[in-house]
Image (cartoon, helix red, strand yellow):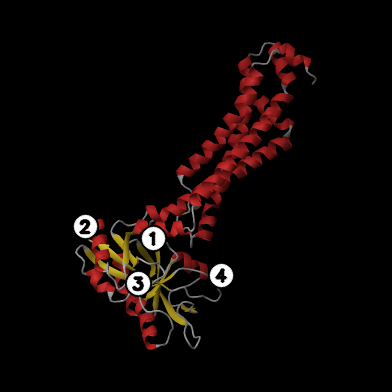
Amino acid sequence: MPIALIWHNLRRHWLRTGLTMASIVVAVFLVCFLRTMIVALNAGIEASANNRLWVQSAVSLFVDLPLSYQSRIAAVPGVEETCKFQWFQGTYIKPSNFFAQFGVDAEKVQTMWPEMKLVEGSYDAFVSDPLACLVGVVTARRFDWKIGDIVELEGTIFPRPDKSPWTMRVAAIYDADNPSFDKSMFLFHHDYLRKALESGEALGQQGVGVYVARIAPGTDATAVMAAIDELYENGPQRVQTTTEAEFNRQFVSMMGNIPTFLRSIGGGVAFAILLAALNTMLMAGRERTRDFGIMKAIGFRDSTAFGLLLGESLLVCGLAGALGLALFVGSAPVVAEAIARLFPGYRATPETIAVGAALALGVGLIAGILPAWQAGRLRPVEALRQEA
């Protein structure tokens, strides 16, 4: 197949070729981006630990459980450790500076979440100081926090009557080997919150939003969940125990059926670019009808005309697809940093890159088949009758 002739044909209408390629670049990038968003939404579910159970109110996640529940949950056979996990929702400087804040049992964090790897500070410094906090590397970078920095949060769920802030000190910063693990959390001592509520220094409901229970290796998680739920079957506050994967799935479902919505958009983008590429190649085939007639009249085979148009379509879509994938891969770290608070699992994976490449080549093949087939079956006499 004469590659030089394909390049010559592409340059004949350079603006149309350029616009078609730009459309495919955008389409490949969007499809890869949307697919990665779906993967990121499900990353927390897929990366969930199978030895952690989450105990919440059976009424609603927003109804706190009594503090007395922790000791009875810890006594259930198969449960090795329990930890409080209380949503705080304080404001740092302004409401747009949102990040997830939780009151926890500081001394149990290291064993409860072994995925956390400290990059600065120490667990001892976090545990020993009742005003200390443990911060994810994403949040630390976002606000340029260093070890020893003082963080002041304005209480929203738990405001102080005198409007004074909740003051904490950065004692440690964590990262994680697992890219899907949330690296933006802000963890502090639950006792700091509890004592303030009990003394009247802060307003709000006393209790715990969720208890996290770590079960022993080889333990039947279903049996442990049933045993915990049975403890409070008749009250005073019924509980619902789920696996960590199911607990994370609840948060995804709270946003609606986002994965289906994103897949629909991606499918629409792919179909639209296929029609655009097909229209471009049909126009190219019609414009070269006389050229193909001359080529066949001087001895070129039908397969040559077929190969020229199909090769042109594959070349345009292949080059545009490569540019689209380069844009996707190059922008992935920036996008991941921007959305890490909500979707910590965003990253360019080989599977997604393969999907983008398959889309580009598939569009090139499908868009080129019809005009190439028409060019291949064209009779020289019919072609030469048409005007140049």
The answer to which of marks 2 and 3 sits earlier in the sequence is 3
Residue 8 seen in the current view: no
Location of residue 371 with respect to 240 vertically, above or below? above
Above-or-below relation of 327 to 175:
above
Q: Earlier in the sequence, mark 2 or mark 1?
A: 1
Q: Is residue 26 above or below residue 151?
A: above
In the image, taking residue 102 as reference, residue 37 lies left or right, namely right
Q: Which residue is mark 3?
A: 122
> Is label 4 in contact with label 3 (beta carbons under 8 Å)?
no
Q: CA distance from mark 2 to mark 4?
A: 43 Å
Name the residue tied to disc 1.
Answer: 176
Q: What is the quadrant of the N terminus in the image? A: top right
Q: First in sequence: mark 3 or mark 1?
A: 3
Instruction: Please name whichever residue, 91 or 177, is drawn nearer the observer in this view of the structure.
Output: 91
Return the residue at label 2: 219
In this view, the mark in front (2 or 3): 2
Other residues around mark 4 within 10 Å, as few (<14) / some (14–19) / many (≥20)? few
Element carrying mark 4: loop
Which of discs 4 and 1 lies nearer the camera? The answer is: 4
Q: Residue at x 80, y 19 (%)?
A: 387
- Which residue matches tag 4? 96
User: Is tag 4's residue or tag 3's residue first in the polypeptide sequence?
Assistant: 4
Quarter of the view holding residue 269? top right
